[in-house]
Image (cartoon, rainbow, N blue to C red):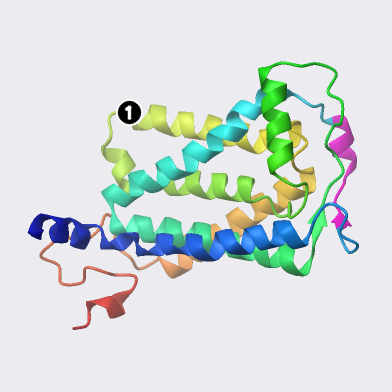
Amino acid sequence: MSKIKKELRKYKHAWPLLYVFIYMPWFILLETLIPADYPGLHILHCPLDDIIPFCEWFVIPYLLWFLYIPAVFVFLFYHSKNEFYRICAYEFTGMTIALLVCTFYPNGLNLRLTDMGRDNILVQLVNFLYTNDTPTNVCPSIHVFATISAHLCLVKSPHMQKLQSRKRMKVFSLILSVLICLSTVFLKQHSVIDIVAGALLAFILYFVVFKWWFRKVNFPEPTVKDPKQHQVLYFLNKK
């Protein structure tokens, strides 16, 4: 029992993940209340959307997003409390802004193909994706925002510098991030407008989070001897 308590104290900084109980109900509610035939839906479209071809191969990096984002969170969670708090602040603030935009500016798109002209395992995965993900609440793209912010948090991590494979990891993360962002338009899941909005949100919040909220926070995290275990939420240090 004492060992369990010790582990719980060691990883008590996981509490920001409770945000999932805010995000998921909110997202599901939007998906339910704002379907594709919603009367007030703003359809997003630009000329570039018609030029970009459909390519089912991009379903691979698109689905890898669901592994990439948790992997970055896990890496920072076990390496630094302060870095974990930073990525949580970054990601969850952006996701909240995206949901607010979709709440007050219902948006969607009419880019999906009804007949792809071929059938293979990748096309079947795309059809599965279309079936389980409505073409609404697309701007700004959370897929793009979360990818860029996760990549920035990863490459900016001081702990990354300690790894012998840091260069390979940074290159891999960059290539995968670019492919994930491109996949959103090549699968007709998003308009170019959505990915630009998601990228802008990520870069604006980068300066807010890195240069403002966390500008005075020491990285890597303080040692055990340092009484300020929580430099960001300093009020948690008070007895």
- The reply to whether residue 94 is visible in this rendering is no
Q: Position of residue 116 (x, y in %)?
A: 83, 23
The image quarter in which residue 30 lies: bottom right
Going 82% across and 30% down the picture, which residue do you hit?
52
| Dot 1 crowding, Cα within 10 Å, few <14, some 14–19, many 20+ | few
Question: In which quadrant of the rendered image does the N terminus lie?
Answer: bottom left
Mark 1 residue type = Ser
Secondary structure found at label 1: loop
Q: Is residue 43 magenta?
A: yes
The magenta stretch spans which residues? 42-51
Q: Position of residue 53 (x, y in %)?
A: 82, 26
Q: Which residue has dot 1 on it?
A: 165
Question: Where is 158 relative to 15, above or below?
Answer: above
Q: Position of residue 39 (x, y in %)?
A: 91, 62
Is 64 left, or right, of 187 in this rendering? left
Q: Residue furthest bottom?
A: 239
Going 54% across and 31% down the picture, which residue do you hit?
176
- The reply to whether residue 15 is visible in this rendering is yes
Question: Where is 231 relative to 158, above or below?
Answer: below
Q: Is residue 34 magenta?
A: no
Is 81 left, or right, of 71 in this rendering? left
Residue closer to the observer: 77 or 220: 77
